[in-house]
Amino acid sequence: MSAVAEVLFYAEEPDPQPWIAALRAALPEARVHDWAAGGAPVCDYAVCWKPPAAFFVGQPKLKAILNIGAGADAVLDDANLPTHVPVVRLDDAGMAGQMQEYVAWCALTYMRNMDEYARLQRAAQWLRLPPRARGDYSVGIMGLGVLGRAVADYLRRMGFPVRGWSASPKFLAGIDCFAGAAGLASFLAGTRMLVCLLPLTPATRGILCRATLAQLPRGAALVNIARGAHMVESDVLELLDDGHLAGAALDVFAPEPLAADSPLWRHPRVVVTPHVSAMTLVGESMAQIAEKIRALERGDAVAGVIDRARGY
Ligand code: NDP
Ligand code: OXD
């Protein structure tokens, strides 16, 4: 780094101090300022997760904004976000492995009827359901980016038939790939468990609605691990109640935390987890951000720059 870089930090976390300490340790050649403490100078870089409206005010010299997350939807929605400063998101940073575990757990649960056996146990009912073969239980992944591709490959290696859907066409070994609006119907028609790993953009908001989910075969399961606003909650509840959807594993909600009176909490066919399918890991994420700042200072290209026009 030519001169000492000034880095502005904010993370919507109960205790951001371990994050600040990890960034300082990973980037000792910079000065990291805790925005919440006040008094930060004009900075070169902003490192943030869900910053408050005032965060970018008085920062005319930012060279880049580093988002402490894979999804940049929250920071892109910030009314004060400078328009010409690149926004860079996390790539994997320890999240892909967690997503693989979460989706593998869902696929085994739904394929082996473990959710149904849990309900039968609560009713003290001894009932053996017809077995299903893993090779017949297709998993469809919406979004074949950093996380979607890692999950698709993991499930394929477990022996599930895997299909994926993305904006642009893909050719991935052992995965049936579909793309764009033209590919959506065929993708859905052959999917027994649908996994959403899309970014939240104007094109994907509300995509998990009746019109989409009704195209899945009856008895399909839904796994939403992307953003709550992908889902039209009332449509999902209706489809669960009429049996079109056999179950839903939901990790993300709009808004979060999920309201205490939401019917999702107590629905017998819904599993709720509190946005933990892939947690942002302090060490890995701060190390990746430090490397990206170093690369930017050298004038090198970095992975994960958001295309503002497409929103991801
Ligand atoms: P990427 O940007 O790497 O991948 C996004 C994928 O979605 C790409 O394959 C892209 O297609 C596809 N896509 C985007 N828009 C459309 C569209 N309109 N139609 C079809 N496909 C589309 O993102 P990541 O894999 O890193 O992360 C995905 C999301 O996961 C994040 O945005 C975030 O919301 C969520 N997430 C959730 C976490 C949790 O704990 N619940 C943790 C981390 C992330 P193409 O390849 O053609 O561009
Ligand atoms: C992310 C998240 O986008 O944690 O990284 O949701």
Image (spheres, helix red, strand yellow):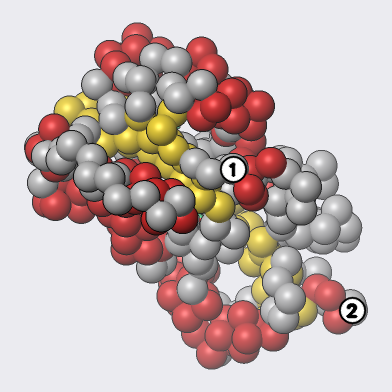
Residue 25 pos. (x, y %):
54, 90
Apparent side of residue 174 relative to residue 184 in the rendered image (left or right): left
- The residue lying at 55 percent from left, 27 percent from top is 241
The CA distance from mark 1 to mark 2 is 48 Å
Apparent side of residue 309 relative to residue 106 in the rendered image (left or right): right
**Residue neighbourhood size for the residue with mark 1, other residues' Cα within 10 Å, grouped as few (<14), some (14–19), many (≥20):** some
Q: Which residue is mark 2?
A: 39
- The residue lying at 66 percent from left, 61 percent from top is 49
Residue 68 pos. (x, y %):
58, 63
- Kind of residue at badge 1: His
Residue 225 pos. (x, y %):
48, 47
Is any part of residue 125 visible from this angle? Answer: yes
Name the secondary structure under disc 1.
Answer: loop
Q: Is residue 280 above or below residue 207?
A: below
Q: Is residue 211 above or below residue 41?
A: above
Q: In terms of image quarters, where does ligand 1 lie?
A: top left
Q: Which residue is mark 1?
A: 267
Q: Is mark 2 within 8 Å of ligand 2?
A: no
- The residue lying at 52 percent from left, 77 percent from top is 282
Name the secondary structure under disc 2.
Answer: loop
- Kind of residue at badge 2: Gly
Residue 199 pos. (x, y %):
51, 39
- The residue lying at 37 percent from left, 63 percent from top is 98
Mark 1 vs mark 2: in front: 1
Asked whether 167 or 161 is in front, the reply is: 161
Apparent side of residue 144 relative to residue 135 in the rendered image (left or right): right
Is any part of residue 184 visible from this angle? Answer: no
Asked whether 160 or 153 is in front, the reply is: 160
**Residue neighbourhood size for the residue with mark 2, other residues' Cα within 10 Å, grouped as few (<14), some (14–19), many (≥20):** few
Residue 27: assigned label: none
